Every structure is written in C-alpha cells, then in structure tokens.
Image (cartoon, helix red, strand yellow):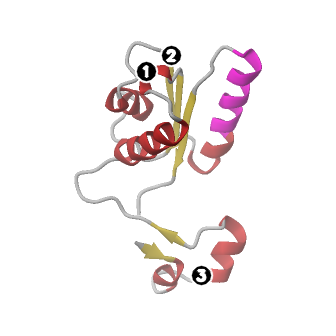
C-alpha cells in the first residue's frame, strides 16, 4: 500500500492537498504478475455475489483505465472472459486518463437511457503505482 505520506517523501505535496483534491488517502499496488483485469474481476465477483446475479446475466462491462493489461484485447474483454460472462452483451474499455470515471458514467447513462441493458458491471481503475 502507498499512502499520501509516502508520496510526501518523493514529491512536493502533502496529505491534505491530495485528499482535498482527490479524496484519495492510499493506493494499493498490484502484486507482480497481476493486471488491472485481475482486480476488476475480484470486484465484479464480489458485486455479483452481493446482488445474487450470475455472470451470464451481465450485459455490459465498462472499464476505465490508462494502464490496461494489454492493448488488445481490451481490459473489459478480459474481465468478461474471466468472470464467465461469455456470449452476451458488450465490453468496453476507456483509456481516458483522469476523466475515465466521467466517460464511464456517460457510457452507463447512455445505455440506461436506451434501456437496452439490464445488468451492468463498471469499474474505473487508476494508474499503476
């Protein structure tokens, strides 16, 4: 885990400045050999279990990150495969840096407005530490 206090030692910043602007207090570093899709899969499985939904019911997977596992296939496609949501719906990764959350929300809003999908899985992943 990397805290704001750890960052204070590396760059000219402080915890208060970071929290006021981002709300972030700490970051988790992925273990060697893991990618963004792995942490998305963990979150998706927890979400599906909490809602009592099968992965086969997921119709849209949206992932926003600037640090994909690889350029192709997209991180969202990797998540779709790893959770077993095969043969259904759409998968979309948004490589849009700082505004990835906003772009993901816009995509979700569009699909909801179209009422073409019933079950969602969306994640925004920050850059790797």
Residue visible at 50% across and 30% down in the picture: 53
Closer to the chain start, of discs 1 and 2, is 1
Q: Residue at x 68, y 21 (%)?
A: 111
The earlier-in-sequence mark between 1 and 3 is 3
Q: Circle 1 — which element?
A: helix
User: Can you say whether 98 is above or below 27 in the image?
Assistant: above
Residue 112 drawn at (x, y percent): 72, 23
Circle on res. 90: none
On-image quarter of the N terminus: bottom left
The first of marks 2 and 3 along the sequence is 3
Looking at the picture, how far across and down is residue 71, in whole percent? 37, 33
Alpha carbon of mark 1 to alpha carbon of mark 3: how far? 45 Å
* Foreground tag (1 vs 2): 1
Query: Picture coordinates of residue 44 (x, y %)?
Result: 46, 40
Instruction: Check whether the beta carbons of the residues at disc 1 and disc 3 lie within 8 A of each other.
Output: no
Instruction: Name the secondary structure under disc 2.
Output: loop
Q: Nearer the viewer, residue 50 or 112?
A: 50
Q: Nearest to the eye among marks 2 and 3: give it.
A: 2
Residue at 33% across, 37% down:
70
| Residue that lies at the very extreme toward the right in this rendered image | 113
Span highlighted in magenta in the image: 103-115
Q: In the rendering, which numbered label is found on residue 56?
A: 1
Task: Work out whether residue 116 or residue 17 is closer to the camera in this orientation and state it.
Answer: 116
Query: On the image, numbered disc 3 is attached to which residue?
Result: 13
Was residue 107 drawn as part of the magenta stretch in this picture? yes
In which quarter of the view is residue 96 placed? top right
Residue 2: x %, y % from top left: 43, 74
Badge 3 element = loop
């Amino acid at each position: 885990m990397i805290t704001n206090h750890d960052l204070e030692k590396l760059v000219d910043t402080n915890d208060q400045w970071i929290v006021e602007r981002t709300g972030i207090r700490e970051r988790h570093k992925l273990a060697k050999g893991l990618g963004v899709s792995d942490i998305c899969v963990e979150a998706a499985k927890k979400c599906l279990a909490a809602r009592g939904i099968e992965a086969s019911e997921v119709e849209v997977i949206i992932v926003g990150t600037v640090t994909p596992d690889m350029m192709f296939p997209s991180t969202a496609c990797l998540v779709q495969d790893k959770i077993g949501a095969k043969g259904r719906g759409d998968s979309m990764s948004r490589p849009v840096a700082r505004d990835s959350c906003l772009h993901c929300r816009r995509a979700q809003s569009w699909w909801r407005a179209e009422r073409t999908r019933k079950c969602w899985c969306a994640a925004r992943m920050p850059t790797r530490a």
